[in-house]
Amino acid sequence: MSERPNTRTPDRRAKALRRWAWGLIATGVCATQVSCFAPSVGNPPEPRQLYFPSGLALDPRAPEGEAAKWLFVVNANSDLAFNGSSLVAVDLNRFFDLAFSDPSLQTVGTLAVNDGVQNVGSEVDDQNPCRRNVSRPQLIECDESSVVNEDTTVYMTTFATVAGIWQPDPASDRLRLLTPVRGDPSISYVDISGGLGGSSLEFECGQGSDESDPRRCSSDFRMKHLRGNEDLTRLATEPANILISKRPGYPVAYVTHLNRPVVTLVDLDGIAEAESGKSVLIDEARILHPTEVVGGFGIAERPCAPEDEGTDAPGCERPKVYFGHRELTRVEIASVHLQQPGEGQTCVGYPDLGEPGGLLCDFQVVDETTFVPQTLGGVGANQLLGAPAFGEMAFSQDGNGLYITQVNPGGLIYVDTSLDDNGEVRNETIDLIEMCAEPQALEVFSVDGEEYAAVSCYKPAEIFIVELRSFRVIRQVIAGTGPHEMVYDPTRKVLYAANTLDATISVIDVSRERVTRFTEIARIGLQEPYGG
């Protein structure tokens, strides 16, 4: 990584704050203006900078027993300060080497801070990038430019959202990262390889075709139309959430839209008429509320218990997926089917669909049923539109519990999804917990055999930790400003949270072996513009 002069100055912080304030206005003005999202207009992002981080994905390729080296971060460009979003790679090994003398984070007791960490208020540079936080001196913060791999950073269009990772072959080092982009609208993807065992990390998204903006991903890596055909249905507006299926034999991803009652299905492997290796939109299922302007957000795929593998138990014969409405307290249940040719039929691509017996042998989302969970505050299925109802959802590891974040009023809902005597899923609300205002993001994780849920609270800048066996809040963790998406690092036993408004990533200790458990121990990025 090349050196650069320190740019963390009070003037830069003031400019960042003004940019954020004006960005709120600009977002409203530009929401309907296509020119606001022109890919080569304006200044490109800084390749070593976090700005409005919206999506996190941990590299799943680490050898067994080793910690992940890379954390992939999607930056949303929410204030329209640059000409688009970006994808950056954070070198976690380097970050923990800089911040702590025990990078494995496995020792018992208090983590040992490196001697090179500076005191509160110190200027940082490439030689000394870490310092103690002004608000909480026990917290270590490091300039992100010292740990972002500048060589790989690529640019996408504005308002990228969450990140999903697909690893087609566990024996290969190749990954595909997908992110819905609201400003386009599209679903962009970047192919990732290398970066392990001394090899160079590589991002591939067709960048280099624009001489004025060489990091810009090409349009070939943006999915906009069904089957990649411009004559077919255009992707619905406001794609905001994505989930990659974990079911073997189903290389698909699900996408929900904030303001459209549809679920978009992505074939990650591609289809017959598509260019080899390209992911393709293959289905748009209208399974949410029929009101045109009401969409969804939360997605959860029911896992299949190992003892049920290969049976017709829910989620085992084919994926069973739960979708939460955005502005109604309802959950839709659907399954994914693969169209198979019958007698006298053959599988064809779309251009050959007119042939006698031709069939599109593709995956399809099929609506099954709906249920209305019990909610906090008496909010019912006929809630007035306009106020978010449900945020993210996630299943327990065994599939017998579904957890739903309720946005208004803030809470977490526990739904029993075990099987009854007839082999049917119960879908009965068991318990509810009241928590912060407007929680949305959710991460379910396991530490030493115990399951927990982390719920991020955007406004109060907190993360609630819920122990799921007893279903109670056991800690409220102070994070950075505007925490949202989270991802769990099982080897280091830490939780990463993207702090959207102060452009940092919180590192939260969840290990039973350390006295710093359930506290923020470090931060990738400096606390600006809200810090000293």
Image (cartoon, grey):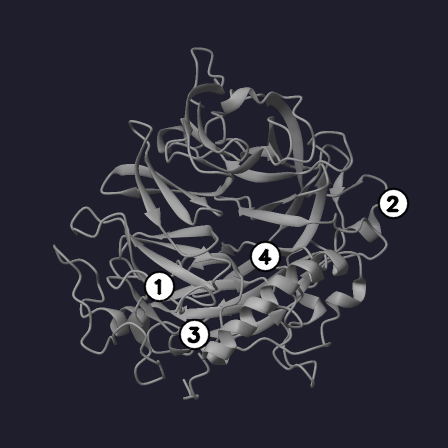
For marks 3 and 1, the one nearer the N-term is: 3
Label 3: state its secondary structure.
loop
Residue, disc 3: 148
Label 4: state its secondary structure.
strand
In the rendered image, the residue lying farthest to the left is 108
Q: Quadrant of residue 346?
A: top right
Question: Dot 1: within a 10 Å radius of its alpha carbon, few (fewer than 14), some, or many (20 or more) residues?
Answer: many
Q: Residue at x 35, y 63 (%)?
A: 523
For marks 3 and 4, the one nearer the N-term is: 3
Comparing marks 2 and 1, which lies closer to the viewer?
1
Can see residue 318? yes
Q: Amino acid at mark 4?
A: Thr
For marks 4 and 1, the one nearer the N-term is: 4
Q: Amino acid at mark 3?
A: Val
Residue, disc 2: 354
Question: Dot 2: within a 10 Å radius of its alpha carbon, few (fewer than 14), some, or many (20 or more) residues?
Answer: few
Tag shown at residue 179: 4
Side of 424 where 454 appears, left or right: left
C-beta proximity under 8 Å, tags 4 and 1? no
Distance between mark 3 and mark 1 Cα atoms: 13 Å
Distance between mark 2 and mark 4 Cα atoms: 34 Å
Q: Amino acid at mark 1?
A: Arg
Comparing marks 3 and 4, which lies closer to the viewer?
3
Q: Residue at x 72, y 72 (%)?
A: 39
